[in-house]
Amino acid sequence: MSDHISNTGPMLASPRCGAKTRSGGPCRSPAVHGKKRCRMHGAAQGSGAPRANQNARKHGLFTGDAIAERRQIQALLGEARKLLEEMK
């Protein structure tokens, strides 16, 4: 055995990262000082998307026009189903 004294108290007492892992459980890493996340989940300097990220919605699926168009299509399909039911 080693004569090394283990001083893990401060590490064990530190606040934990608030992120969820892929398995669904909480991250067990200690949070970076002054932040709520560990260095791997977003507390590292320069991590995350830049402000006013132009690539965030690149495909346009959630633009106002696309949502309005989908609503119109759903309304039209609903009217068509109603008309088909009346014809039976």
Image (cartoon, helix red, strand yellow):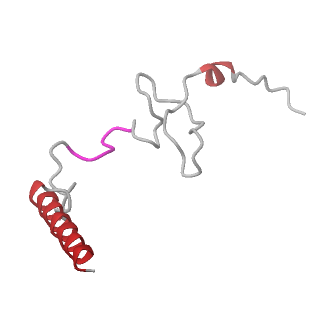
Q: Residue at x 80, y 26 (%)?
A: 4
Picture quadrant of residue 78: bottom left
Q: Position of residue 42 (x, y in %)?
A: 39, 40
22 left or right, relative to 58? right
Picture quadrant of residue 14: top right
The magenta segment: 44-50
Type of secondary structure dominating the magenta stretch = loop
Q: Nearer the viewer, residue 20 or 82?
A: 82
Where is 30 relative to 61, above or below?
above
Q: Nearer the viewer, residue 10 or 3?
A: 10
Where, quadrant-wise, is the C terminus in this rendering? bottom left
Q: Residue at x 49, y 38 (%)?
A: 19
Picture quadrant of residue 76: bottom left
Q: Residue at x 17, y 68 (%)?
A: 79
Q: Nearer the viewer, residue 42 or 24?
A: 24
Q: Position of residue 26 (x, y in %)?
A: 57, 38
- Residue furthest out toward the right: 1
Where is 53 relative to 7, above or below?
below
Q: Residue at x 47, y 43 (%)?
A: 40
Where is 65 relative to 84, above or below?
above
Is 45 a magenta residue?
Answer: yes
Q: Position of residue 1 (x, y in %)?
A: 90, 33
Where is 74 relative to 38, above or below?
below
